[in-house]
Image: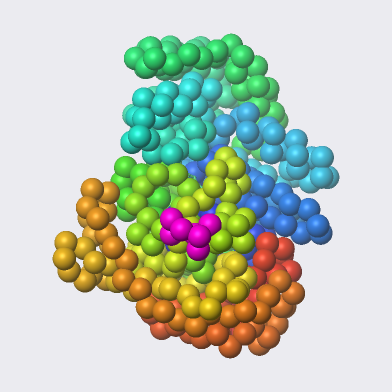
Amino acid sequence: MKVDVLLGLQWGDEGKGKVVDVLTPRYDVIARFQGGPNAGHTLEFEGTKHVLHTIPSGIFHAGKVNVIGNGVVIDPVVFKKEIDALKARGVDVAKNLFISRKAHLILPTHRLIDAASEAAKGKEKIGSTLKGIGPAYMDKTGRNGLRIGDIEHPDFLSNYNKLVQKHKVLLAQYNFEYNLAEMEPAFFEGIELIKNLPLIDSEYEMNRFIKENKSILAEGAQGSLLDVDFGSYPFVTSSHTITAGTCIGLGIAPTNIGEVYGIFKAYCTRVGSGPFPTELNDETGELLRKKGNEFGATTGRPRRCGWLDIPALKYAIMLNGVTQLIMMKSDVLSGFEKLKVCTKYKYRGQLIDYVPYDVVNEPIEPVYEEVEGWNEVLDHVTDIDELPQSLHKYIAYIEKATGLPITIVSVGPDRKQTMLRDIMVK
Ligand code: IMP
């Protein structure tokens, strides 16, 4: 069976975790392919909220296989906390969580370098989550990194110390104080825990699942507009967040990709620095933040908020080969008399409908169309036909602009507040 992919079409925080959790009953295997503890996938059911950082969002469904692929970077400290929290809720991770030996490790010194480098950038900082993501991927591509499989090797400690020495030389260039000795015990506790979990050659396992006709869902992290190549560089994350990243991060061929679910919020948010054409620095932005509870699941930082951006959405759809759309947080837009949708940009004196090369140094101005809003509170709506007419029109408007069907509409954080339309494929 082909591998379906679910990923974010904006700047992350679209609600991927919740939808993966809802779709998991349809799949045998859920796999993460990139990113690491910079992600915060929030799931809500039975009155409780769960935040996952590294572990796939299928973990709450007994009997489903959850794979952390080679493209992911793992911080044993965060990972152990996640595992401990899951165990406390009675989730048996040893049975259904498998980790790629080729996934790279985030060392405490990676986190220190992240913090030192951001502090040194001052106003130009990326707004990193400071989880050590960039430095860990730098060591991966620089061919210095340590991988999960290395912890099984008798020389692991000496290899760890060698890499730490390199990092200390780097850190010496920054005026940055740190206490590594305080950080290391938690790291090694995490390493011991990982040693006792099933470590796999995930590229072989994934391809075996495909051959055995298992249904597989690949779960993206961050968002397409944070992709290291296609995002607003340098204000991006360090991994490939788009569909192509699935092939690299799991070791599967492009011909094995099936459906691509592109998930987006009914408006836009961004956390951290970088261009955001439709950002609202006014009371409307403030209202969206308040109503949408737009604060980071990983860092708690307030998210920047703005109207839906169609050229950016279409760019992400193009990069990912999206086959169906999922619209989140429609409930947050209740109460606005009119909604604005950016359909074009004003850039270098011209009207354009694409994302230009330089959005960092050159001003880019959104050009809006107005559509009707709705007043109805949507929290309790469970039948798509009960959604207000204006929301149906908003859905139709986006479908027309993108040329794709919106097959899932979400009106709240709970599993139950998710409506699958009968046009959904699968
Ligand atoms: P890093 O990946 O932690 O280095 O952060 C790079 C940029 O991506 C920053 O602007 C972060 O705020 C943003 N970012 C990283 N992970 C996420 C995420 O899961 N959701 C939203 N933004 C993220």
Question: Can you say whether 86 is above or below 155 in the image?
Answer: below
What residue is drawn where x is 49% and y is 66%?
267
Q: Is residue 143 left or right of residue 90?
A: left
Quarter that holds the N terminus:
bottom right
**Picture quarter containing residue 401?**
bottom left
Q: Give the magenta-colored segment's residue range.
A: 280-286
The question of residue 221 being in magenta is answered with no
Q: Is residue 318 left or right of residue 422?
A: left
| Chosen colour scheme | rainbow
Quarter that holds the C terminus:
bottom right
Image position, residue 120 (x, y; %): 36, 25
Image position, residue 372 (x, y; %): 50, 83
Image position, residue 292 (x, y; %): 60, 60
The question of residue 284 being in magenta is answered with yes
Residue 28 visible in the picture:
no
Image position, residue 205 (x, y; %): 57, 49
In this view, which residue lies farthest toward the front? 283
Question: Can you say whether 76 is above or below 271 in the image?
Answer: above
What residue is drawn where x is 57% and y is 71%?
333
Residue 118 visible in the picture:
yes
Asked whether 80 or 370 is in front, the reply is 370
What residue is drawn where x is 69% and y is 34%?
81
**Picture quarter containing residue 288?**
bottom right
Asked whether 307 or 413 is in front, the reply is 307
Q: Is residue 383 left or right of residue 216?
A: right
What residue is drawn where x is 74% and y is 74%?
380
Question: Can you say whether 272 is above or below 332 in the image?
Answer: above
